Image (cartoon, rainbow, N blue to C red):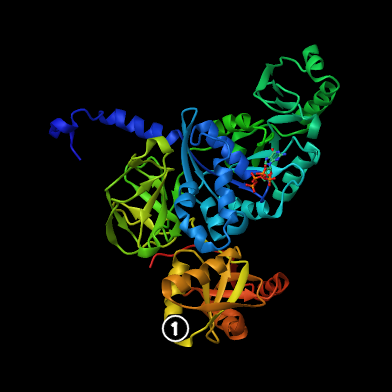
Amino acid sequence: MSTPETVSPETASAPPKAEADSKFREEIEKRRTFAIISHPDAGKTTLTEKLLLKGGAIHEAGEIKARKADRFAMSDWMTMEKERGISVTSSVMQFPYRGYELNLLDTPGHRDFSEDTYRVLTAADSVIMVLDNANGVEQQTEKLMEVCRMQDTPIITFVNKMDRHGLPPLNILEDIEETLDLETVPLSWPIGMGNRFRGTYNLYRDELHLFSHADMEGEHERLPIADLNDPQLDEVLGDQADDLRFDVELVREAGDKLDLQAYLEGRQTPVFFGSALSNFGVGDMFDAFVEVAPPPQPRPTVTREVSPYEKDFTGVAFKIQANMDPKHHDRMAFVRVCSGTFEKGMEVIHHRTGQTMRLNNATTFMAQDREGVDTAYPGDIIGIMSHGRVKIGDSFSQGEPLHFTGVPSFAPEHFRKVRLDDPFRSKHLGKGLQQLSEEGAIQAFRPLRGNDYVLGAVGELQFDVTLDRLENEYNVEAHLTGVPYTCCRWVDGPAEDLEDFEADHRDRLFRDADGDLAYLALSDFRLERTMEDWPRITFASTKQHTAE
Ligand code: G4P
């Protein structure tokens, strides 16, 4: 890089260093890298669409829903894969909103719920949780919350579908507190629900937000209210005014106060009520979100924490997308920029292999009208074509040997045994499963006793994908059969205890693709019993990837 004394005519217009530094800082501070989590059908797609419309990243209502419909109308996975162009661009969406740069990471849901769904969350700095007002906290949200909890991810809650009849708002708050062990602070309060849903009361601005039409259509009106006893309230809300007064008083007196630190530490969640479908309350929630959500955060490595403000580029791969181009077995690694500035064509060290990589073909995920942008800042995601060289959890830097942690493998929840149709293809099967495990598509376990691999997945669709890819990419025809396992834990401990444990549980012990020891249990109850019986052995439900 040129020093001030050696400035060449071409670089004479470059900003002075201090200015460049403040621009870098500004770029970081205006970024919000986040994910939206929900149980299927709570309204994640509808909300995402409304956010993208607000940010100008899409121009028509229905674009995202149409993509989703396309994806789920596909009967087989390969057809779905052929549409990968679509799903890749929708995996990361960068768009501006009120001066902020937002990176929305799509967490696969529904049929393609998979380990990726968990892992994508590890790349987000904060989360918007969408709940259906009729169902409160549901099972898939609970699972995703466990991942958020691992990193104390800050969470903003949007209680959706207030235009439909659901649980009383106070019960929903109670449910969040009890089920997720998260303090709630409502920042807006619904006025009625179902066909009596009139709007919301913004509790931190003391503003009434109302639909302008009784049919819940149209832009909503905002009415500042200095005092809840203002007779204006009775004029516009009629008999619902007193209900609102009562609720607000109750919430203000009995509820917790907004504590930004508690939010940032993942202990407290601000809650908004609204209807994504009617685009009501979404702007309110999002305005608060961009203000309070954290900018890119420091990321842990084995040796030290890396601050986003460090000058040198560093990044970590958290997702691998296969078959970008099926003819070339291409794979795209999604890398989160952790520090420094990424520039297209820059050379980085790929730490697991020690090799230098020139990132000429990296993709950035800017909104449509800013294609060709080839700079990325901390919090942004870049896509690197990897031809199978990059594994989940791999770290990149400009020199310093760093190994990022925090992108783990998650214990699978579904299991199948693989049976080869042609026993002479077993070497190919081994190679295929090794590679598919490395890119995080599936987890393959080899038994200590016996030969048949057991596959582990977080979502059932991972099995279909694996069989399909084994056939198409490795020319291996196989089928799957059921196995009685229900949970998996990676085990470790002092050598002599491990030896005894191995001798005792040989039939339930496996080696994963990294050679680490895993215990597959027949039930949660059995697992608990085993854990009690072997207090010196650790049973881990996640596993960090280790550098070789
Ligand atoms: P998801 O991504 O979390 O799975 O949910 P999605 O947005 O697809 O919403 C699931 C269903 O809930 C959709 O209805 C959607 O229209 C509806 N929905 C979303 N937000 C609201 C809301 O605020 N109020 C009401 N009343 N409904 C809402 P669908 O019938 O399954 O699909 P569609 O035919 O409407 O596309």
Q: Quadrant of the N terminus?
A: top left
Residue 212 appears anywhere in the view: yes
Q: Residues within 10 Å of mark 1 (few under 14, many from 20)?
A: some
Q: Which is nearer the eye, 35 or 213? A: 213
Q: Which is nearer the eye, 90 or 182? A: 90
Q: Which is nearer the eye, 299 or 96? A: 96
Q: For the point 70% across and 30% down, which residue is it?
A: 188
Q: Quadrant of the C terminus?
A: bottom left
Q: Which is nearer the eye, 355 or 531? A: 355
Q: Is residue 539 left or right of residue 440?
A: right
Residue 514 appears anywhere in the view: no
Q: Residue furthest top?
A: 231
Where does the image place residue 288, in percent across and percent down from the top left?
A: 59, 30
Q: Is residue 48 above or below residue 241?
A: below
**What amino acid is labelled 1 in the image?**
Arg
* Residue indicated by mark 1: 425
Where does the image place residue 102, in percent across and percent down from the top left?
A: 48, 37
Instruction: Choose top left, top right, bottom left or bottom right for residue 233.
Output: top right
